[in-house]
């Protein structure tokens, strides 16, 4: 899907492709290509004489951020956050290519993202097509805001899942934690790549920045570093939560195996008796052999069940007493 935007009274106005001929060539234009198909990619390549390898890089989901100077245009690839509610990994990132010509800028993305939606909906203040370097910096600034917003939502979801796991450990909650950890990994990698892009914009002269653009670039770098630190912190917290519940699962399994071992040891006695009387040889009291083994086996089974119940109850009462003592110590402290 390719949309064409011009700016009137600091507001983006959508126009059709046929209306482009009605505007002078000096009029600045934003070409917004999102969820592009193969035919649209070929159209952009032929219409604006774009390099085929460039478009392949932009459509690559794993492409990192960078900026390059070509003969007729400047290419910049950024990593922007993406929210897909119907996906297993709800929060991810996608590369967005910005091709800057003297009179137009083309943004290309294989999917859709909130940053480009906000731009087209005029939700970003002071966004002007008269200054393409500032336009690019505004995109990065908006992406940092969305990164921070999504990181806070991930933190709230981790806290909510942690509360659910305290009540009952389910596989679904653990899988959700794993997917959120993947999202944090994507965010961390993309933010580091964007940080390198910002540093390259500052060091090189590919984009001509004025003093206002330099100040905006400083603010964007600060926000990007803040988002990187938050992503690292939340990633460590999520990893710690998953490790803690993995230890809880292992501890619960050990307790279950302990109970089974107790039951197995107690049941060895009646198994031995029934096996002994099942052997094919003469026994004392052979005339009463039909009653004595059954009676002894029944008695031993009953005693074994009672012993198992007592041992398990004793362990449960001992754990309860330990918890009560711990609570009393906490209250005293």
Image (cartoon, rainbow, N blue to C red):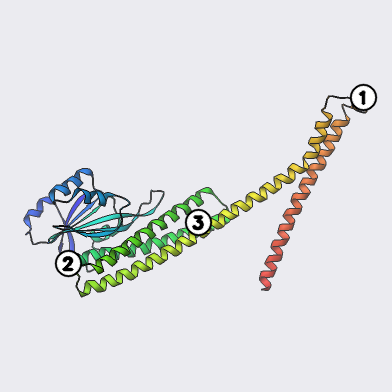
Residue at disc 2, secondary structure = loop
Coordinates of residue 303 in the picture (x, y in percent) = 82, 42
Q: Residues within 10 Å of mark 2 (few under 14, many from 20)?
A: some
Q: In percent of the image, x 22 and y 69: which residue is there?
A: 126
Looking at the picture, tell me which residue is in the foreground, 173 or 49. Answer: 49
Q: Is residue 60 left or right of residue 74?
A: right
Coordinates of residue 333 in the picture (x, y in percent) = 66, 73
Coordinates of residue 155 in the picture (x, y in percent) = 45, 61
Residue at disc 3, secondary structure = helix
Query: Which residue is disc 2 drawn over?
Result: 131
Looking at the picture, tell me which residue is in the foreground, 27 or 46. Answer: 46
Query: Which residue is disc 3 drawn over?
Result: 161
Report how far apart the C-alphas of labels 1 and 3 lie in the structure: 67 Å
Q: Is residue 306 left or right of residue 176?
A: right
Q: Residues within 10 Å of mark 1 (few under 14, many from 20)?
A: few
Instruction: Give the image quarter of residue 322.
Output: bottom right
Residue at disc 1, secondary structure = helix
Query: Which residue is disc 1 drawn over?
Result: 287
N-terminal label among 3 and 2: 2
């Amino acid at each position: 899907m390719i949309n064409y935007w011009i700016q009137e009274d600091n507001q983006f106005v959508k126009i059709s492709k046929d209306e482009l001929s009605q505007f002078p060539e000096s009029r600045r234009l934003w070409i917004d290509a999102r969820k592009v198909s193969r035919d649209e990619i070929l159209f952009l390549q032929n219409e604006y004489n774009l390099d085929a390898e460039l478009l392949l890089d932009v459509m690559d989901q794993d492409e990192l951020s960078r900026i390059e100077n070509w003969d007729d245009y400047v290419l910049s690839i950024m990593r922007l956050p993406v929210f897909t509610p119907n996906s297993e990994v709800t929060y991810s990132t996608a590369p967005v290519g910005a091709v800057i010509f003297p009179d137009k800028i083309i943004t290309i993305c294989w999917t859709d993202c909130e940053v480009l939606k906000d731009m087209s909906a005029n939700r970003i203040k002071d966004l002007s097509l008269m200054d393409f370097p500032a336009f690019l910096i505004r995109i990065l600034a908006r992406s940092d805001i969305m990164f921070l917003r999504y990181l806070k939502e991930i933190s709230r979801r981790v806290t909510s899942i942690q509360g659910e796991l305290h009540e009952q450990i389910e596989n679904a909650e653990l899988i959700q934690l794993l997917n959120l950890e993947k999202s944090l990994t994507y965010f961390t990698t993309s933010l580091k790549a964007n940080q390198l892009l910002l540093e390259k914009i500052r060091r090189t002269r590919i984009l001509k920045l004025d003093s206002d653009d330099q100040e905006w670039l400083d603010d964007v770098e600060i926000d990007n570093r803040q988002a990187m630190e938050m992503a690292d912190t939340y990633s460590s917290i999520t990893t710690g939560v998953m490790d803690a519940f993995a230890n809880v699962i292992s501890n619960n399994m050990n307790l279950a195996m302990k109970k089974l071992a107790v039951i197995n040891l107690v049941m060895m006695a009646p198994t031995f008796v029934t096996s002994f009387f099942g052997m094919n040889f003469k026994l004392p009291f052979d005339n009463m052999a039909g009653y004595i083994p059954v009676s002894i086996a029944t008695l031993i089974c009953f005693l074994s069940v009672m012993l198992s119940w007592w041992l398990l109850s004793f362990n449960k009462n001992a754990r309860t007493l330990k918890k009560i003592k711990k609570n009393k110590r906490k209250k005293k402290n």
